Amino acid sequence: MPKIPTIPARFTPRGLGAWLALAFSLLTVVLTLLLVEVVERAATDQVKSSIGNGLGEMAMQTADKLDRGMYERYREVRLMARRNDLVAPSASQAERRRILNDMQSTYGYYEWIGMAGLDGTVLAEARGLLEGKNVAKRPWFTNALEGTYVGDVHEAVLLAKLLPVQEGEPRRFVDVAFPYNDDAGQPAGVLGTHLSWEWARDVERSIIAPVQARNRVQALIVSAEGVVLLGPEGLQDTKVDLPSLRQARQGRTGYAVERWEDGRDYLVGYAATRAVGDFPGLGWH
């Protein structure tokens, strides 16, 4: 069985560890990077190529899994917004709450799922959270009234005091929202969801974990503006401007050897996400 080349311990990257706050929209360009400090200078190009191609493949798998996960949520919320037993004016609050709770129970990453009327008042929510409160000024509500809204990963605002405290870092959400119509086909309100960003963390772990024991590998997601959104400690909220990021923005997949601001050289695999089905995609790379 062929062995995967390993990197000498003295050249492994140091403490690049915690997660970063995330904020992105449909136009966000994200770079998925899998980093490993470059093998010693005496290593052959063949070794670098072998490791680099592997990193590029893992970056592509991560990007694809993220996009497909968002597509599933996009499709699910859209279908829910069309359920007559949920959006019909005659539906009771208790019945709406039951339907929403059933939906939340099917996917554990839904932190909040509710529907609001045209004035922004929350009419029903899976667990009753924020019912009666007004969300008219929240981006997911105002943007969804114009069509569809996916994006703006953000820290909890109205829900910060209602959800259990999360150890390690503040809760962060990805919003997915669709308008729903009345019997005449006119907009009657918005069905909105807050998807926990723990979902993305778990996606990254599922790809990286199998090789983590053999190689020091890290994943990064970087916004269109070059801000590190998810990745190692020490890079939180910092901006990076890398050749690999520019390559990824052009939809390319591959690897590169780059010197970062810490003065170390890294082997970087990068890949671009793609739209899935009728989901327009988030433009991640």
Image (cartoon, rainbow, N blue to C red):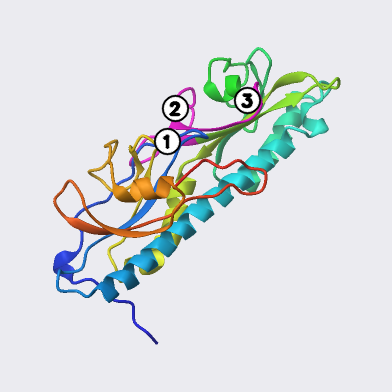
Q: Residues within 10 Å of mark 2 (few under 14, many from 20)?
A: few
Which residue is painted at 27% across and 70% down in the image?
Answer: 48
Q: Dot 1, how many residues are within 10 Å of its Cα: few (below 14), some (14-19), or many (20+)?
A: many
Helix, strand or loop at disc 2? loop
| Image quadrant containing the N terminus | bottom left
Tag 1–tag 3 contact (CB < 8 Å): no
Q: Which mark is residue 160?
A: 2
**Which amino acid is tagged 1?**
Arg
Judging depth in this view, the residue of 72 and 276 nearest the camera is 276
Q: Position of residue 4 (x, y in %)?
A: 33, 77
Residue identified by numbered label 1: 171
Residue highlighted by disc 3: 144
Q: Which mark's residue is nearer the viewer, 1 or 3?
A: 3
Q: Position of residue 187 (x, y in %)?
A: 74, 20
In this rendering, is residue 198 above or below 3? above
Q: Nearer the viewer, residue 262 or 14?
A: 262
Say which of marks 2 and 3 sits in front. Answer: 3
Q: Which quadrant of the figure has residue 8?
A: bottom left
Secondary structure type for disc 3: helix
Q: CA distance from mark 2 to mark 3?
A: 22 Å
Name the residue furthest top.
Answer: 119
Question: Could you tell me if the residues under marks 2 and 1 are in contact, i.e. CB atoms within 8 Å?
Answer: yes
N-terminal-most mark, 1 or 3: 3
Q: Is residue 186 left or right of residue 108?
A: right
